[in-house]
Amino acid sequence: MEDAQLVQDFLGGNHHAFNVLIKRWQDKIHHFAYRYFASADDAAEITQKTFIKAYQKLNTLEDPSKFSSWLYRIANNLCLDELKRAGRKRATSLEALKTAPQTEVSSSADEKLVRNEALVLLHKALLQLPVDQRMVVIMKEYEGMTFREIAGILDESENTVKSRMYYGLRTLKKTFDSWNINQEVFNYD
Amino acid sequence: MTREEAQILLMDYMYGELDEQQSRELELFLETDNELKQEFEALTQTRSMLQHLPVKSPAEQLIIMEPDKEASTSESWWHRVSSLLIPQSGFGRTGFAITAFVFLFFVMGAFTDMNISAGDGGFKMTFGEQPPVQTGYTAAQVEMIINQVQQENAEMINEYVLAAQEQQEAQFEQTLSTFAQYLDNRRESDLELFNYSLTSLEETTYDRFRQTDQVLGEIIQTVSTN
């Protein structure tokens, strides 16, 4: 059943329809928030708040077919609120950053350990992006949204979104180069 | 296609959001611009690295519990009634609140015997029974009070004038006696000075007579000797 139909059902009094929507979107919103904060606890909190707010405000959704964009907008705003509330200090105390960046990879190190460290650095590089670029990279790269959808969620022009994506990728490339992270590291499986 | 146009289309091309014709045009351009092509390949590789980012799934499934229907029914009933009574706009709500306050104020006033009055002394609001009001004096009483006050004033002024007169007389007598005493003292001192002057004159005159006699005696003696 389509999201729009579930929204209509819920507004018509079918409470179960909303739980179907939760089941359908919880993982995606959780992953979105996890990639944003690199913290499972924060991701769970943001996800919970997102669905509570959606439950309370669903009657204000003008076009039920845009439920997913509307849900991501709520999640995005909650992430930004959380960032403002917690301040910049938060960005340096995330569980993904327990390992300090290393500029050289020891040739004698275990390949899996090297890979795990590279994954931590990968998340650290993402967290170091400016908030507006990070948001676009996550939505595009991991949520698979089109530039038009992202522009609609962020209330920006498509060109602005593309520009943020372009500069976000360039910044990430520079960071990976400076930390000696390359594709080969991730092939150690 | 210019380089700027190609850069703008690069992101669309990378994520497969270009149509076939635009894609072919961009691919042809990339064959001519080696620098942009290398950048495209580097960004594509960065993309592929990002795909390795780990993610954690939620630990538990969220579920929204259905609200209690009875409570919901009573709540919605109350909600309907209140929405009918209370205006929904902010301005209307403010007006409704003010009206309700005024109504409540007068209802409470009716129960507490509230009395509001305005006079020269200002605005006055009282609760409970009214205190007895002073109605004032009759014309005869006022005349009697005025007469009494006038009489008391006249007596008081008379006493005051007499007292002031006595005080002035006493002061005048004291001044006269002081002046008389001063005149006596002055006369005595003048007499003493006069006596002293006469005595001095007498003594001077006697001395001069004596000197004259002495000179005459010497003259006579000189003449007789010659």
Image: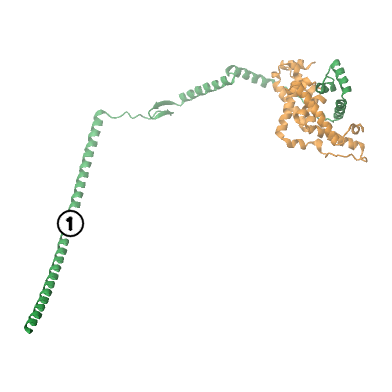
Q: Residue furthest front?
A: B226
Q: Colour of chain A?
A: orange
Decide which of B170, B146 is in the foreground and name it.
Answer: B170
Residue under pointer 1:
B179
Query: Mark 1 — on which chain does it sit?
Result: B
Q: Residue A168 at x, y = what percent?
A: 80, 29
Task: Specify whether B151 is left or right of A159.
Answer: left
In which quadrant will I find the C terminus of chain A?
Answer: top right
Quadrant housing residue B181: bottom left
- Label 1: element kind: helix
Q: Residue at x 83, y 34 (%)?
A: A175
Give left or right: position of A63 versus B46. Answer: left
Answer yes or no: is residue B64 visible.
no
Residue at 76% from the left image edge and 35% from the top image edge? A91
x and y percent of residue B23 in the render?
A: 86, 18
The colour applied to the residues of chain B in this rendering is: green
Tell me if residue B203 comes above or below residue B226 in the rendering.
Answer: above
